[in-house]
Image (cartoon, rainbow, N blue to C red):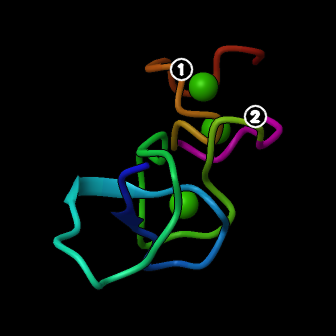
């Protein structure tokens, strides 16, 4: 299993694979690893950002 950095601590990683013995999370699904409110299972809200990482901003509004 490879590890990725989870800088914002939301459980979703981003960026490059970490070299051992570094540990992180087992996915790189986060499209904004500086914002714990943004990850693939976040609820899209009308705020001008892509909260749920589907590539579309505010698609429900
Ligand atoms: Ca995030
Ligand atoms: Ca979205
Ligand atoms: Ca949004």
Q: Is residue 41 above or below residue 13?
A: above
Tell me if 53 is positioned left or right of 40 in this view.
left
Comparing labels 1 and 2, the label whose residue is closer to the camera = 1
In the image, 57 versus 26, the foreground residue is 26
Q: Residue furthest right?
A: 43
Give the number of the disc on residue 54. 1
Residue range (magenta)? 42-48
The secondary element bearing badge 1 is classed as loop
Q: CA distance from mark 1 to mark 2?
A: 10 Å
Residue 24 locus on image (x, y percent): 46, 73
Query: In the picture, residue 11 is in which quadrant?
Result: bottom right
Tell me if 2 is positioned left or right of 60 in this view.
left
Picture residue at 36% right of the left edge, 52% below the top = 2
Label 1 neighbour load within 10 Å: few <14, some 14-19, many 20+ = few
Ligand 2 is within 8 Å of the C-beta of the residue at disc 1: yes
Residue 20 locus on image (x, y percent): 23, 76
Ligand 2 is within 8 Å of the C-beta of the residue at disc 2: yes
Q: Which residue is mark 2?
A: 44
Placement of the C terminus among the 4 image quadrants? top right
Picture residue at 64% right of the left edge, 36% below the top = 40
* View quadrant of ligand 2: top right
Marks 1/2 in contact by CB < 8 Å: the verdict is yes
Tell me if 2 is positioned left or right of 43 in this view.
left
Residue 19 locus on image (x, y percent): 16, 71
Q: Residue furthest bottom?
A: 21
């Amino acid at each position: 299993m490879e590890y990725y950095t989870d800088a914002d601590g939301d459980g979703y990683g981003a960026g490059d694979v970490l070299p051992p013995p570094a540990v992180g999370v087992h996915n790189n699904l986060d499209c904004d690893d500086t914002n714990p409110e943004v990850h693939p299972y976040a609820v899209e809200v009308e705020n001008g950002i892509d909260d749920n990482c589907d590539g579309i901003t505010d698609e429900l509004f």
